[in-house]
Amino acid sequence: MEPDHPGELLMPSGTGILAFHLQGRYHVSALAFFDGELPKNYLIGQQTVSYRLWVEEDTDIFGIALHPTSAWKMTGVPSYQLTNSPTDPYTLFPTKYHPFLKAIEESENFEQRCKSGNTLLEFFQAEHSPQKTLVDYALDLIFEKKGCLSTRNLCKELHVSERHLQHLFRQQIGVSPLQYARITRFNAIFVEFTRTEAPRDLGFLTSFYNYYDASHFFKDFKAYSGEAPSQFHLEKFSLLKELVEKDPYLTQVQHLKSR
């Protein structure tokens, strides 16, 4: 990537990410939480802001998107410690997982890495299935409503106090129910936004996704994308364009199994 390139834009996806640099390193600029070279291997929880990637031509990375509660279930580490914090997975995962992590690192090609990654996830699922938590059920409701659900109504559906749900989300996901619902809602509206030919009906999108007004939507859009809707052009970001157009990674988390 050229030195004066603004970097590839990525946004909060609602997933945790387990990643392995097989060659070279990604460089990230997200001034709110990280600025510099990523660790060789890392696990990161929720990302709450957009960020930019600078990728060297010879960089090779393999990543696994995790269901929001999976990092907590796998490591036992409170998820708020992983929010916006890329950390060496070998310091987080119990030793019983280390052979699986090593197998991913040492795989010779993409197909083998996928197979090793699936083996890791199958081992995890065998230990935890079908142990859904209250937070997993809350996530099902958030995904069903595309994030258009208040914490109060969420608690009413689950018959739980707001204080208790806030505590569980912080432990198991790393952000509040309100923050996670906002990320989910933005993911949904962003996919709609990028699939709609200009001129886009921002008034309709604002209303459909239960924003109070256009300024509220603009504030969220800039917070999560780094640009105002009128300034955003997907064509500038080849990686994001590929991820959104084929099978939007921003919404894939909703189809991951709650384990």
Image (cartoon, grey):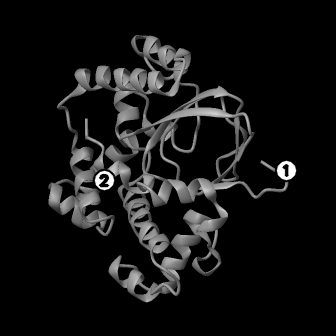
Q: Residue at x 49, y 23 (%)?
A: 92
| The quarter of the displayed image where residue 209 is located | bottom left
Q: Is residue 159 above or below residue 218?
A: above
Q: Is residue 232 above or below residue 63?
A: below
Q: Residue at x 17, y 62 (%)?
A: 156
Amino acid type assigned to the residue bearing label 2 in the image: Arg
Q: As drawn, which residue projects farthest toward the right?
A: 3
Q: Residue at x 62, y 73 (%)?
A: 232
Residue contact at pointers 2 and 1, CB within 8 angstroms: no
Amino acid type assigned to the residue bearing label 1 in the image: Pro
Q: Is residue 55 left or right of residue 254?
A: right
Mark 1 neighbour density, 10 Å: few (under 14) some (14–19) many (20 or more): few
The C terminus, quarter of image: top left
Q: Which residue is mark 2?
A: 163
Label located before the other in sequence (2 or 1):
1
The CA span between labels 2 and 1 is 47 Å
| The quarter of the displayed image where residue 127 is located | top left
Q: How many marks on residues?
A: 2
Please provide percent x and percent y for residue 223.
Answer: 58, 66
Q: Is residue 118 above or below residue 247?
A: above
Please provide percent x and percent y for residue 107.
Answer: 52, 17
Mark 2 neighbour density, 10 Å: few (under 14) some (14–19) many (20 or more): few
Q: Is residue 210 above or below residue 7?
A: below
Q: Of helix, strand and loop, which one carries label 1? A: loop
Please provide percent x and percent y for residue 114.
Answer: 43, 27
Please provide percent x and percent y for residue 29.
Answer: 71, 49
Whether residue 11 appears in this view of the structure is no
Q: Of helix, strand and loop, which one carries label 2? A: helix
What label sits on residue 3 in the rendered view? 1
Q: Residue at x 36, y 49 (%)?
A: 253
What label sits on residue 256 in the rendered view? none
